[in-house]
Amino acid sequence: MKKDFIFSSESVTEGHPDKLCDQISDAIVDHFLQQDPFSSVIAECAVSTAILFIAARFSSAAYVDFSNVARNVINQIGYDQKDFNSKTCSIITSLKELPLNNERNFDERKLSEEEMERIPVRNQVTLFGYACNQTASFMPLPIWLAHKLSRKLSSVRIQKILPYLMPDGKTQVGIEYVDNKPRRIHSVTVIASQLKPAVKGGPDLQRLRDDIIENVITPAFQDEEIRPDDRTNIFINPDGPFIVGGPSVHSGLTGRKNAIDTYGEYSRHSGAALSGKDPVRIDRVGAYAARYAAKNAVAAGLARECEVQLSYSIGLAKPVSIQVETFGTNRISDDKIADLIRRHFDFRLAGILKRFNLRYLPSTIKGGFYRKLSAYGHMGRMDIGLPWELTDKAAALREDAQ
């Protein structure tokens, strides 16, 4: 395996058209589950040039006004410009309401072990969970820093520190690794791809670059152990300031930012969209369970890196395969770690739902739960109390590994 290399990961702000679609899709999931935790719902969005399309199929006792949910999300993100805003954009829906599904009406909190064994998955998928010791969040450093920059780019817009910014933006961070460990920051790219026209106070390119360095890049790295140095390449709108951006210029689609949602391509991901699906979909919640196992294995000191692979087949309750790869950083064998993970983690669908309380979180968290995941990553979040980010099994794994 290569030990010296440069690796880059990107993030986008919540105003990126793909992320706009993710947030609308997950807001719809939240609204269903807040009223009926046994809801079955798949919601997907596409947006382009002031037109938003929502396709959904659902089985639920809840009532959800899809268009109203979408318009609220658009408004909250900050799209209030003439070319795209929550009041005038056209919303087209294609909705399929299915009969109530009695198979979904089980309460995992009350099931016996035997009953949990009889709850099968309805999707065929291979999932990956990853963790490493590069950051306090057990995430790869490139995606961790890229997310920090994106959040800061949004923050200075919302706080009107840089009032000329608009919601759409991108960031990218390149890390130089030596002997498989982060050594220095090779490059930082910030693209404020949406700027208000100059007649409304937009900046010239030099002012934009000075403002971004002072208000976004410098504070984002302030508390980091590794910071930009004199050799770090810093790119800010390298193609020049763009006057417009967002859905009025380029399209968006639910589930198109899987790498940003997970590990920034530093580790594998399944390719299945995470947003827009209720928690009975194993292709969503299985990814959370795999991350949980990998993170606890690293927190237990079993390896410096850990990738957990779960493969599910339709009609079975458990994964047909559980594989572990530690990339040569293991303290004990990968087979031993996989055996420990099998013993200490429940990867059955009902077990995942029960462990993480996934069908009930939207009704207990103000503003919903799943929409909070749909921008800035589903993994490694330290701003939300995510159940799959706990390291509560690390001590047991460490003890059992002796």
Image (cartoon, helix red, strand yellow):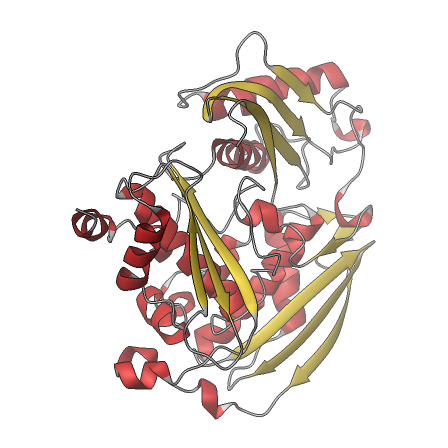
What residue lies at 38% left-to-right and 36% top-to-bottom? 329
Q: Is residue 50 above or below residue 107?
A: above
Quarter of the image holding residue 158? Answer: top right
186 relative to 321 in the view: left or right: right
What residue lies at 40% left-to-right and 69% top-to-bottom? 363
Residue 208 in the image, given as x and y percentages of width and height: 69, 20
Quarter of the image holding residue 123? Answer: bottom right
- Viewer-side residue, 358 vs 245: 358
- Viewer-side residue, 186 vs 401: 401
Residue 137 in the image, given as x and y percentages of width and height: 38, 39
Q: Is residue 326 above or below residue 201?
A: below
Residue 386 makes an appearance in the image: no
What residue lies at 34% left-to-right and 81% top-to-bottom? 116
Residue 40 makes an appearance in the image: yes
Q: Is residue 368 above or below residue 182?
A: below
- Viewer-side residue, 140 vs 329: 329
Residue 197 in the image, given as x and y percentages of width and height: 80, 31
29 relative to 45 in the view: left or right: left
